[in-house]
Amino acid sequence: MTTTQMTAIQDTQAYHIDPTLYEGRPACCEGRLAKEIRTYDLLDRLGIPYQRLDHDAMPTIEACHEVDRMLGIEVCKNLFLTNAQKSKFYLLLMPGTKKFRTKDLSRQIGSARLSFAGPEYMERFLDITPGSVSVLGLMNDTENQVRLLIDKAVIEGHSYIGCHPCINTSSLRIKTAHLLERFLPAIHHGYTLVDLPEEVIPG
């Protein structure tokens, strides 16, 4: 076993993951934040089924990989971006194995000098905090201030997508088709497909 593998095991063991894959919302929502409960309410109202995994906040990428493995999905990055003027905001979904380069995205969406948006904008538009970035947070963007960008590799050949219910102590597995065809239309958000290069992060 390599040092990296040993470190990954130690990291995941340092945080608790409930091994049960639950169907739908928690039986008891006591102690859970209102924004998380609102997420379940909306998914239920739209008739979107989902599986849920509860866990501690996962501050390491190795621990996040373990959650995704237990959900049976591939890692997906959720990046909250802005332009230099802080006048346009973007939520980018891309494979976790790809390296993000601003120039590759900028030319496709016509927005130069992209950078990560600060937590104050994250909270203002999506009602989420760093570490909890999620496509489901768009339900809180009632004025459509955030443009959703999806790398085509995220949805091509992938029946399910993973996301947080606006808080990073639970992770959901939702059918990709339900996200695109039910959830986004219901919250009046569209999406733009982008095609980012296949250069991958070394394992």
Image: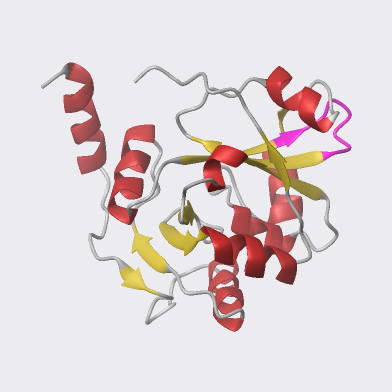
Q: How many marks do you count on the picture? A: 0
Q: Residue furthest left?
A: 1
The span picked out in magenta is 81-88
Q: Quadrant of residue 88?
A: top right
Q: Quadrant of residue 94?
A: top right
Relative to the observer, which residue lies in front, 90 or 153?
Answer: 153
Left/right of residue 58 with respect to residue 125 in the rendered view: left
Question: Residue 81: horizontal and vertical position, in percent?
Answer: 71, 35
In reply to whether residue 84 is colored magenta, the answer given is: yes
Left/right of residue 68 with respect to residue 184 in the rendered view: left
In reply to whether residue 2 is colored magenta, the answer given is: no
Quadrant of the frame with the C terminus? top left
Quadrant of the frame with the N terminus? top left
Left/right of residue 146 with respect to residue 198 in the rendered view: right
Instruction: Please give the name of the residue rendered at 38% of the width and 49% of the height, measured from the top-left corner.
Output: 73
Left/right of residue 103 with respect to residue 60 in the rendered view: right
